């Protein structure tokens, strides 16, 4: 039996409906690299969600989708502004710098979100060739700290950016959790809020693998097909990602999965909040719970359930729920935690 | 119904046994990024094939595997020597240059193979800082022209390379077809023939996706895990590639698939050889058939069967067979071709 | 007549002794790219200063020297830790990221210096492939805020770095000002303090152009000649930089120039300190004076003397002195400033 | 006494008029990085030569100028087509690949020149994302084999390029020798012949250092100032390059120097042609003479005069003349050669 846990939503498997779609797509010969009917349908499905005048490119993984997004809007002398906690800053082993040549500017944050006031401090040096030219702002929705931007907060960022000639990227690795938590259509807090390009994640919410780069500012999608190929994110048998996305939208599977994961996170939060010795450090707005617990019990708890330490210096841990987290997982975990404390 | 064809072995779907293995791997939670029991088994399976003292890294696609290989053995001031027809030279949109910074040196070839005599012409400028330093030779087995190196030919290259302090990479996107065609164990014409690093392909022979970078010279694998992550080739739910590789080795599925594809290519060759107006241009040693046919019939034939023009200037086409090519495909195609001529 | 000013020490010209050395070097044919007798002498002069077992590479400019240093000690998956005010972070248009592929980690500082406590916060994620691997720490001596590290402060950083397996680079664009201010031999606060590689600047202290990359950890100099060529920092007529360095060391010209510039900075500091409305913001330890003055007078003052605003948000300006700054420059400037206030 | 020779035109020193101009430019303070009056005059001088509507950027060296040119017209997924003998292909240690990410496509040549027929063979794969997209053609005038394109030959290339949507770069490291040899204004075989961007060399013809990147297609110069800074080619005390260019154009110094070097090459050619055992391999159209001589005498001759072996495999050597080559040099060399044969 495999150990269950709260390490990451990508420790979960694949939703059965997704697997079934993959099987169905295995139907004889199809042209490779995305020129197949399933991919065409999947792209059409994205257009239904976001509007006809978009461009969509599928990628293997989240880092790939983020890099394709950033590379399509920057040249190497640009800088990318993001939260100091952003996945592109902390968890991609420097892929954005390597692939785009750009400088990343980490912006102070306590909750994973960045705001115009802090961003503005880095909007200088324009036209001054010694300074990496501010090129794009990247925000994460859900953030890496499990928090959410409101639509107005996003608009404030995109307005600021566009006023200065910058673009805005959204890292939506957990966009389904955001949409479900706020009960909003995807479009309302992306395209309609002024986002230029979106990494639309599938892997963390029940797909096997597959992310979509969605361009609302399609002028910058002109060369993305070459960037994708050169960045090694072009899947030869692409139908097997496209079919997953079709199933993901079918009957709002994405929403069912995300609502469930979010619900489990709230349950987890409420259960651990009852336990003395646990200090919650972030608002639980999606499917992540952050807490400080005594350092000495962390390894013992990890023997029973997977999870990661988030900030060793203050003994902060991260617990992620997924589409397949069960109430038993939560209660069992809370019990184990309580016993250790 | 989907149109069948001979465009590429990646236009075929996934072998049922592979799909089944994927389903089985969908068994609850597992740690991501390769630290799961299925991946451990898959790596062990590679070690059984190639020896215990190797290092193996799974990647999403062939370009990814090639770049990981080259990047692990070079610095940006090195050059990579390869056939002018090599996939890394012609079909990867400059990914090797972009990701490694290296210069690629295309070597003249008429059959997709390169030989010491031609290679030697480029082995100069050592220690001369104005000249990109020859760093690694890359050969393809099967070549992009459907031909095969003998073990001795490979050894001649690796000996030359090592004598000059260079390394040798093998692009084995179709390595199964090579092993099957020559009835040789993988090890005999890779590790035992002096190859330093191998891109071991799965996708083109019945897997959904998945390539393995196999290091025989493990000293250079030291930093590959970082290179893989930074190159966006690290799969979070890696078990779903690992499970494919396990099934691929099980009962020598790889061999059944490859033998079949190779057999179909020989059948195709013999059928089209009978047709007046068809000139075969390469020996059919694996699963590709190359021929010159009249330019005007190409689009008409393509309406019935997928395939690509290889060299427009001389009206040369490429026909690839796959694990799922049927005799009916061949006879139907030969008939259609005959009628057009 | 040219306007004089305090914009930068590179707005000054070339010391006459340097010019004369250039003229003398113009003596017929010499082998290019550094294989000439003048360059050999210049390298020997550096060895006299720093020890025989070093490696020296001349470069065109400071950004070049910094990038050669960093590139020789890193791979693209590494990170470079530096003050948030570092030249490599703020004033090189992303050259380090572009050329090395590395992530730069800016560390909080109020005075341009960084300390072990803050550095340690970023020394994590080792062996974790998602995280850019901490590779090298870069400090500036003199810092970009005109302040100086003590030898002990430098040792504390190099000890920390080496303990964690990191290297330490010193950006010594103004190293002469540091040595002169502290009356220390170059070696004492570089090599002897544990520095691995040094950008030794000449341009800002009376040379026409020319920086030296000095390796104390020579193992990492093995490929620097290729990196220099590929980074476009290899000067064909190198003797004309080498001759400058020889003159620069002759009769301690570097020291005379630096002592003078430092002295002028102290004079400037004391003069402006007397003026109401001027708030000094940094200790004047070398040849830079930092002050807050009313925003509205800045453009008026700039009409009479060149200088740059350092931090627009708080109306902070930077005034640099040079080897050719005169007391008249200082008194004239102080007078102009006083009149405007 | 320094050994004289024919190794390269950059083994010569600096013309006295250039040195004098440098001295004169050493006139107190001037704003750095090109915003000084001398640079403005130098740019104006280029405009007088090539037309008002151009953009000019000074760089340190030839590799720098070439990379700035190529980088301004390409993205990383493009390819650069050039002669297999081109400096960018053979002598820049992969700088173009490293800095632009592009693939270089070497085109067969026996005389250093490329022609539409051969170029066309590489103009395919447009819009096909697997193939590096042909982006720019680079030709050298004078070529690396000492030969010259006629204006019509250049026009044939630029017409072909523009017809396919490509740009054309000219590597004019020895452009003065070309202009002098053909008695043509610079403009006639660059801008007026359809060239988009030119590396205009100074270093090899009597300057200390300094190359200019001249954009005729100024749309692509939009971001070059950032590219130059990020590529470490921005000179802080730029006036000292600008002053050289002013002197270079003054009284057509460039022409005097180039005519002399060319004349010396013709004299050298005629002298060595008389010697049995010397086979000239290229037409001497500028300042380079190429010949095959017995391999065993090469090192002996090199003891007396600097020069390089060009192609070891066939014992071919290169002899370059410079602005300061004397008739005595030629006669002495021919005598030495004769004695050895």
Image (cartoon, coloured by chain):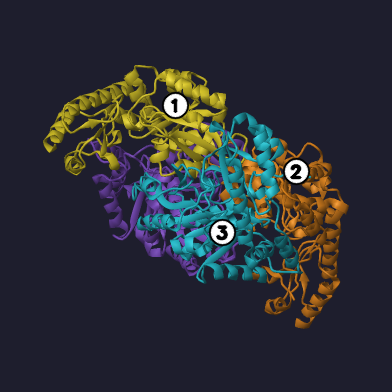
Chain colours: A cyan, B orange, C yellow, D purple
What mark, if any, has residue B195 been given in the picture?
A: 2
Quarter of the image for residue B19 reads bottom right
Choose mark 3 or mark 2, whichever is in front.
3
Estimate the x, y position of residue D265 in percent, counting from the top left: 44, 47
Name the image quarter holding the C terminus of chain A.
top right
Q: Residue B220 occupies which quadrant of the picture?
A: top right
Q: Residue furthest left?
A: C339
In terms of depth relative to the viewer, which is nearer, A35 or B83? A35
Front one among A284 and B121: A284
- x then y, percent, for residue C313: 29, 42
Indicate the position of residue B197 as horizontal and vertical percent values.
Answer: 72, 44
Is residue B171 at all visible to an observer of this figure? no
User: Which is in the foreground here, disc 3 or disc 1?
Assistant: 3
Q: Nearer the viewer, residue A300 or C229?
A: A300
Badge 2 density bin: few <14, some 14–19, many ≥20, Cα 10 Å: many
Disc 3 from disc 1: Cα separation: 45 Å
Q: Secondary structure at mark 2?
A: loop
Mark in the foreground, 2 or 1: 1
**Alpha carbons under labels 3 and 2: distance apart:** 52 Å
Q: Is residue C83 left or right of residue D242?
A: right
Residue beneath disc 3: A180
Same chain assignment for discs 3 and 2: no
Looking at the image, residue B295 sits to the left or right of residue C118; the answer is right
């Amino acid at each position: 039996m495999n150990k269950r846990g709260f390490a990451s939503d990508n420790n979960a498997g694949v939703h059965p409906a997704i697997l079934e779609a993959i099987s169905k797509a295995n139907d004889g010969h199809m042209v490779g690299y995305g020129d197949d009917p399933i991919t065409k349908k999947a792209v059409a499905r994205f257009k239904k969600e976001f509007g006809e005048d978009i461009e969509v490119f599928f990628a293997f993984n989240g880092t790939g989708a983020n890099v394709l997004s950033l590379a399509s809007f920057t040249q190497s002398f640009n800088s990318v502004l993001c939260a100091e906690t952003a996945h592109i800053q902390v968890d991609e082993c420097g892929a954005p710098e390597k692939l785009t040549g750009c400088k990343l500017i980490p912006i102070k944050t306590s909750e994973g979100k960045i705001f115009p006031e802090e961003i503005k401090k880095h909007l200088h040096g324009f036209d001054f060739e010694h300074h990496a030219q501010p090129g794009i702002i990247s925000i994460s929705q859900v953030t890496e700290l499990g928090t959410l931007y409101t639509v107005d907060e996003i608009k404030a960022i995109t307005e600021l950016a566009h006023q200065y000639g910058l673009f805005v990227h959204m890292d939506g690795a957990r966009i389904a959790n955001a949409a479900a938590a706020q009960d909003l259509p995807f479009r309302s807090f992306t395209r309609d809020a002024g986002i230029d390009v979106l990494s639309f994640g599938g892997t963390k919410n029940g797909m096997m693998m597959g992310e979509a780069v969605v361009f609302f500012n399609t002028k910058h999608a002109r060369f993305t097909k070459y960037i994708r190929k050169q960045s090694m994110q072009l899947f030869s048998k692409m139908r097997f990602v496209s079919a997953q996305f079709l199933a993901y939208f079918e009957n709002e599977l994405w929403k069912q999965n995300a609502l469930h994961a979010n619900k489990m996170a709230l349950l987890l939060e409420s259960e651990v909040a009852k336990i003395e010795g646990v200090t919650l450090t972030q608002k639980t707005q999606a499917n992540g719970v952050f807490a400080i617990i005594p350092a000495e019990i962390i390894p013992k708890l990890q023997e029973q359930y997977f999870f990661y330490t988030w900030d060793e210096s203050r003994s902060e841990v991260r617990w992620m729920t997924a589409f397949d987290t069960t109430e038993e997982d939560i209660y069992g975990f809370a019990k184990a935690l309580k016993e250790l404390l």
